[in-house]
Image: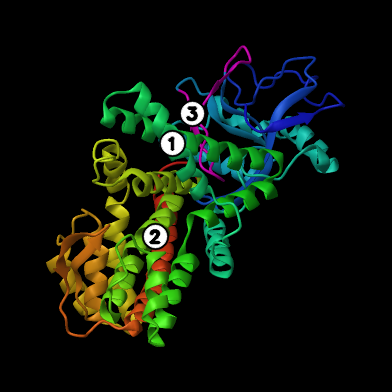
C-alpha cells in the first residue's frame, strides 16, 4: 500500500460487495474496514493524452480472495498496467482514474489488441465498474481535507522545476559563509569516523573502504529520509526540501565569487591580496606566484570545479533527484578529505579516490564535450577547444580532470599545467593547450563565462535526455 491514510467515516470502502466475480479487475473490499491507505495522484497519460487524477487504492493485482500482490513503485507521475493470462487486469488502481470512461476504454482496448483477445466478457466486465469506483472519489471531492494532492508519494513539482529553482537559488544566494552546509557536515563526519576505523582495522585500505561505505550509504539514507519524509508530511514541503537539497549540491555562485575575489585585486596589480584569495581556492603554494601563475591556477580551479561543483551533481540529480545529487557530493567530499597521496592517506584514501574517479567518469567527459558549443556561445574558440580536447585530454594525473581542462585551455588559447609547489615540494603536470596568449586576469573572467554557458547546456541536455528516456520507455507500455 502506498500513500497516507484516508479516513472513511461513512464506510464507503467497507460496505461494498465484491464486483465482477473472481476474475474482476476491481480491488476486493473487506467488510468492516474504516480506514485504508490511499494516495491522491495526478498525471498525464502520454500515450492516450488523458489527464488523470484519483485516489490510489492499491498497487499490484487483486486475487480472488481479496489479497493483493504489490508491484514496485514507479517514478513520479507514472502508471503501469498489464494483464494476467486468466483475464485479470492489474495496475495502479485509482478512484477517479479507472472510473474515467475514456481512459478505461482506451486502456482495456489497448490490452485486448496487444494480447489478441476478442472483446468478450472477461474484459468487457471492466467497463461496468464506474459506480463502485466513483463512490470514494465523490466522497474525497466533497471532503478534500481527507487527502493530499501529490504524485505517488513524491513531490508534485516535476524534477526539472526543482533543478531550475535550485540553479536560480544558487545564482542568487551562493553559499553564505555562516549558514550550515551539508558538505561541511559530511567532511566533519568523515574525519570523525577516521580514527575509530583506524583503531579497529589494521589494514589502511580496508579502514578507508569502510569509511566510504559508511559515509556514502549514510548520506544516501539520510537524504532519502529527509526528502521523502518531507513529502509525506506535505507535498509542498517535499518540493521545498528537494529544492534546498539540490541547491546545497551546486556551487556555481560560490566558485564564481572565489574566482572573482582573485581576479579583482589581480587587475589592480595587488598580487599580495590576489595570492591570499587564491589560497582559499587551491591547495598549491601561492606565496611566490606572479600574475600569469595566479591566473593559471584560478582558471584550472574553475575548470576542474565546473565538474565537481556544478555539472556532476546536476547530472546525478537528473538521474536520481536530490538524493543522488547529495550522494555524489558525499563521494566528492570524501575524495577531497582522504584522496591524497600522502603517507597518511596513501592507503586509507584509495577507495575514496577510486570511487570519485568512477562517479566523475561520465560527467567529466560530457561536460568537456558540451564545453565546445559553450565556447562558441561565450564568444570563445569552440573549434580549438575540440582540437585541444582530443589532443591533450590525457595529459593530467587525474583520469577525468584532463578532459575539461584541455577543452578550456583550447577555448581560451592558453596553456595550462606546468610546475606547481605543494607544501614546499615541487610537482609538474604535463601541459594542456598552446601558449598562444599569456595568461592574465582577463582569462579568469572568460573562464567564468565559459563555466556559466557550460552549466546551462548541461542542465538543458540533462533534462531533455531524461524526458526523452521517459518517452521512449512509455512508447511500448502503459507508462506516462
The span picked out in magenta is 63-84
Using the image as rendered, state which of residue 250 and residue 207 is in the foreground.
Answer: 207
Q: Position of 82 compared to 274: left or right? A: right
Q: Which residue is mark 2?
A: 311
**Mark closer to the chain start, 1 or 2:** 1
Q: What is the quadrant of the N terminus in the image?
A: top right
Using the image as rendered, state which of residue 309 and residue 341 is in the foreground.
Answer: 341
Disc marking residue 215:
1
Q: Nearer the viewer, mark 1 or mark 2?
A: 1
Q: Give the alpha-carbon distance from disc 3 to disc 2, as whole Å.
A: 42 Å
Above or below 236: residue 379: below
Q: Which residue is mark 3?
A: 83
**Mark closer to the chain start, 3 or 1:** 3
At x 41% / y 88%, what residue is drawn? 268
Q: Nearer the viewer, mark 3 or mark 1?
A: 1
Image spot of residue 46 (x, y percent): 52, 52
Q: Nearer the viewer, mark 3 or mark 2?
A: 2
Above or below 148: residue 405: below
Q: Give the alpha-carbon distance from disc 3 to disc 1, as whole Å.
A: 43 Å
Amino acid at each position: 500500500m502506498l500513500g497516507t491514510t484516508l479516513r472513511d467515516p461513512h464506510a464507503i470502502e467497507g460496505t461494498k460487495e465484491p464486483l465482477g466475480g473472481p476474475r474482476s479487475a476491481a480491488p476486493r473490499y473487506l467488510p468492516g474496514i474504516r480506514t485504508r491507505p490511499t494516495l491522491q495522484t495526478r498525471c498525464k497519460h502520454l500515450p492516450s493524452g488523458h489527464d488523470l487524477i484519483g485516489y490510489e487504492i492499491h498497487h499490484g493485482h487483486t486475487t480472488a480472495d481479496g489479497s493483493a500482490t504489490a508491484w514496485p513503485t514507479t517514478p513520479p507521475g507514472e502508471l503501469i498496467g498489464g494483464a494476467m493470462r486468466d483475464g485479470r487486469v492489474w495496475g495502479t488502481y485509482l478512484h477517479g482514474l479507472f472510473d474515467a470512461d475514456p481512459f478505461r476504454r482506451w486502456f482495456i482496448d489497448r490490452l485486448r489488441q496487444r494480447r489478441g483477445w476478442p472483446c468478450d466478457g472477461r474484459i468487457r466486465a471492466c467497463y461496468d465498474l464506474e459506480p463502485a469506483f466513483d463512490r470514494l472519489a465523490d466522497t474525497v471531492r466533497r471532503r478534500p481535507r481527507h487527502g493530499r494532492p501529490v504524485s505517488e508519494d513524491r513531490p508534485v513539482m516535476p524534477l526539472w522545476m526543482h533543478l531550475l529553482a535550485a540553479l536560480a537559488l544558487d545564482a542568487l544566494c551562493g553559499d553564505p559563509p555562516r549558514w550550515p552546509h551539508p558538505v561541511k557536515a559530511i567532511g566533519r563526519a568523515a574525519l570523525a569516523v577516521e580514527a575509530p576505523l583506524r583503531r579497529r582495522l589494521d589494514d589502511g585500505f580496508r579502514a578507508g573502504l569502510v569509511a566510504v561505505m559508511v559515509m556514502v550509504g549514510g548520506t544516501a539514507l539520510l537524504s532519502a529520509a529527509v526528502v521523502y519524509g518531507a513529502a509525506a508530511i506535505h507535498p509542498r514541503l517535499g518540493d521545498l526540501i528537494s529544492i534546498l537539497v539540490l541547491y546545497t549540491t551546486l556551487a556555481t555562485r560560490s566558485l564564481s565569487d572565489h574566482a572573482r575575489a582573485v581576479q579583482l585585486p589581480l587587475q589592480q596589480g595587488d598580487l599580495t591580496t590576489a595570492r591570499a584569495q587564491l589560497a582559499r581556492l587551491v591547495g598549491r603554494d601561492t606565496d611566490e606566484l606572479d600574475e600569469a601563475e595566479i591566473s593559471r591556477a584560478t582558471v584550472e580551479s574553475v575548470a576542474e570545479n565546473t565538474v565537481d561543483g556544478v555539472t556532476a551533481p546536476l547530472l546525478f540529480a537528473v538521474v536520481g533527484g536530490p538524493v543522488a545529487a547529495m550522494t555524489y557530493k558525499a563521494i566528492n567530499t570524501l575524495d577531497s578529505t582522504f584522496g591524497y597521496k600522502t603517507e597518511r592517506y596513501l592507503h586509507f584514501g584509495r577507495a575514496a579516490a577510486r570511487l570519485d574517479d568512477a562517479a566523475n567518469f561520465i560527467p567529466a567527459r560530457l561536460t568537456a564535450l558540451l564545453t565546445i558549443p559553450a565556447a562558441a556561445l561565450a564568444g570563445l574558440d569552440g573549434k580549438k577547444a575540440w582540437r585541444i580536447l582530443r589532443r591533450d585530454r590525457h595529459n593530467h594525473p587525474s583520469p577525468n580532470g584532463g578532459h575539461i581542462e584541455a577543452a578550456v585551455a583550447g577555448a581560451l588559447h592558453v596553456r595550462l599545467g606546468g610546475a606547481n609547489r605543494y607544501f614546499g615540494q615541487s610537482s609538474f603536470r604535463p601541459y594542456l593547450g598552446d601558449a598562444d596568449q599569456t595568461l592574465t586576469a582577463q582569462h579568469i573572467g572568460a573562464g567564468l563565462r565559459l563555466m556559466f554557458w557550460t552549466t546551462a547546456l548541461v542542465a538543458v541536455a540533462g533534462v531533455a535526455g531524461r524526458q526523452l528516456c521517459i518517452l521512449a520507455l512509455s512508447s511500448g507500455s502503459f507508462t506516462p
